[in-house]
Image: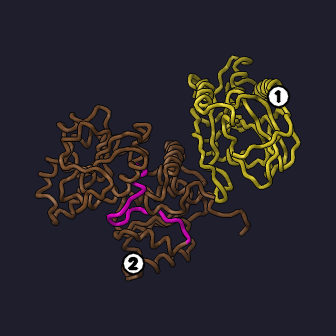
Chain colours: A brown, B yellow
Amino acid sequence: MGALTTEHLLNIEDLNVEDIHTVLDTALSFKEVNERTIKKLPTLRGRTVINLFLEPSTRTRTSFEIAAKRLSADAINMSPAASATVKGESLVDTAKTLDAMDCDLLVIRHRYAGAPYIMSQNMRAHIINGGDGKHQHPTQALLDLFTIRERFGGFEGLKVGIVGDIAHSRVFGSLAPALKLLGASVTAIAPATLLPARPDLLGAGYIHDLDEVLGHLDVVYLLRIQKERIDQAPFPSLREYARLYGINRDRLGRMKKDAILMHPGPVNRGVELTFEAVDTAANLLLYQVNAGVAVRMALMYLLLGGDRDGTLA
Amino acid sequence: MVRLETKSVVMDAQAIDRALTRISHEILETNKGAHSIALIGIVTRGDLLALNLAKRIEQIEGVRVPVGSLDISFYRDDIALHISPELHTTNIPFSVDGRTIVLVDDVLYTGRTIRAALDAIMDYGRPAAIQLAVLIDRGHRELPIRADFVGKNVPSARTEQVRLFLAEVDGRSGVEILQSSPGEHIGAAPLGAQNLESDETADQVQKLRSYTDDVEVDE
């Protein structure tokens, strides 16, 4: 039997409080491994991990690939160009094909919400959601939780402000419910155009003015502004956004002394953070990336460990 | 947690004490002193025994040997069958290259834990040699592995468990034979059993482990 209450990680809600702490504790052990000279464990020898990334991504895909390889699993990367989906294969057919190749764990990133669920219904493999549309990005949330827990020791009573494109953010979709579950309070900070039509249904507080709450926050989490969508004009200009919601020297000075800045990356320098603020926050931003590998190793270990019965094949 | 019946006590605190003193002397005798050795204990009891041995070696020889702890969870050969969610951090604060490593565990049984530990140590470097010290050898080996230093040989049935309790973490010291139901898997014995509050246990373990904090390692 596995150590988690779920076989897949499709949504952050698949994990209960205990599961989340199990993942974070396990990740701590893998972090030690990642600091060794020989960063390799035999743990998942002979298991096959397929990274199916049907949306451009380097950092998340690389992070999953490194995680699988450090655990000695055979990691195969499939990108849009290499995949049969460009030839018109349906997602269900892709799932059945990969299943026939006896894949043990599938990481999928897809531009439509729910794609990981479809895979889980058509494959025997464990599924990890690597980001689906505007829905969820649970492994990002877990590495953020890891970083926050390392910094503050826990979550109870922490005040977290998440700033930016709330309406279209899958990072928010996973992180906000997890933080709430763990006892932190979450405030969405954005102009009305970047909030969903019914912000009252977010399950989090919301406010338009960053400066009003900045001095009370323990964690200031900046979402990436997707410049590629700027032509839909959610705000007049990047410059205006930066002036109202960007972290600059002045706002850094008004944050609580032990507050931290977080960002899922990649940072648009001069938009979410000024050049100066990026450099101030650099250590923690890189810590998030570093923690990402350990957290993904932990998930693979916990999902694949104990999933076979003892009978001889 | 399943409460297991104690069938018999095979070593009391004094017997453990004498066995550890003897093993310390044997380690020093075999290695002609303490300068090239380091101890690595397998969590959760082996690491405490390793610290205990290190203290005795210091008393006998006046040399502080480096001590590390090792969690072998990621090296087990049965990960596909079951995993324990409880992990302990591995801490080997010295280079194993060229050193003689004395691997320390409480109970030697199938040999699979030791096999995993050997692989784990090799991932840290290339020791000059690895020796094995165990408090109990209970037989039933499934791999060609033997111990260099043994506290006591305890013949046992597979349906039994042989477990070490240590005063520092369990509130009592002794080696006991417990009856377990067949097929039941029990991994590393939890610290603190039912006797101590977990905070208190953590403090005790912390105190024990602080022994290694000021060991100077000559590289």
Query: What range is drawn magenta here?
Result: A124-143
Quick one: SS at disc 1? strand
For this rendering, which residue is in front, A95 or B178?
B178
- B207 to the left or right of B33: left
Does the magenta run of residues contain B114? Answer: no
Residue B180 percent across, percent down from the top left:
79, 48
Q: Which residue is mark 1?
A: B12
Q: What residue is rendered at 63% in x and 42% in y?
A: B71
- A211 to the left or right of B91: left
- B103 to the left or right of B146: left
Tell me the number on the disc at residue A35. none
Q: What residue is rendered at 28% in x and 50% in y?
A: A205
The quarter of the picture where residue B162 lies is: top right
Q: Amino acid at mark 1?
A: Asp
Q: Which residue is mark 2?
A: A85
- The answer to whether residue A37 is visible is no
The verdict on a common chain for dots 2 and 1 is no
A263 in relation to B91, above or below? below
For this rendering, which residue is in front, A222 or A211?
A211
Q: Amino acid at mark 2?
A: Thr
Mark 2 vs mark 1, CA separation in Å? 68 Å
Q: Residues within 10 Å of mark 2 (few under 14, many from 20)?
A: some
The quarter of the picture where residue A54 lies is: bottom left
